[in-house]
Image (cartoon, grey):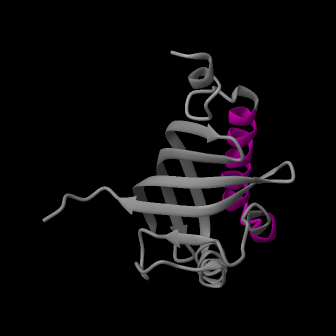
Amino acid sequence: MTALQQESILVLPFTRERAEVERRLMRVMSAARRHAIDELESYHAFGPKFTKFDDFEPLDRQDAEATKRLEREAILSVREFVPEVIDLKIDVFGAVAVTTFVMAYDVTTEQDEHYSFRARATLVFANDDGSWLIVHEHFSPFVANS
């Protein structure tokens, strides 16, 4: 490997940045668990470049406004939301980081109904003036293609 290749954002470890992104991801999960919706929203770069694909309806690509509305409704409509990040991988490419993991989460409704889900998850973060913010989310359930 040449010296130039060793300096490529494709191979540099970005150790400090990876740790920062992991801390931010854990804060995201904590805010969702605590129903701290304003805090949760502050970890997103909601604007014209934000996008999301969810594992629940609507399955179309969501923009910032739809995501804010739907996440607020979902989190505030349940008594308990307990997410767990499994098999986390973080890849940093300079000012952009891609996190991939399995999100296992349990939900308890206001009617005391309990549900458990597992989804493949990708969150893309961009570093905006020293703060890692989510610019894209993609969740897909574990189901076989037919």
Residue in view at x 56 percent, y 45 percent: 99
Q: Is residue 97 above or below residue 105?
A: above
Q: Horizontal and vertical percent for residue 26?
A: 69, 45
Residue in view at x 47 percent, y 78 percent: 61
Quadrant for residue 37, please give it.
bottom right
Quadrant for residue 137, please give it.
bottom right
Residue range corresponding to the magenta coloring: 17-39
Relative horizontal placement of residue 28, taking residue 5 as reference (left or right): right
Residue in view at x 53 percent, y 66 percent: 108
SS assignment for the magenta stretch, majority: helix
Farthest residue, direction right: 129
Residue in view at x 50 percent, y 45 percent: 100
Q: Horizontal and vertical percent for residue 126?
A: 70, 54
Quadrant for residue 77, please give it.
bottom right
Q: Horizontal and vertical percent for residue 25?
A: 67, 48
Towards the viewer: 91 or 42: 91
Relative horizontal placement of residue 116, taking residue 16 as reference (left or right): left
Relative horizontal placement of residue 118, taking residue 71 as reference (left or right): left
Towards the viewer: 12 or 142: 12
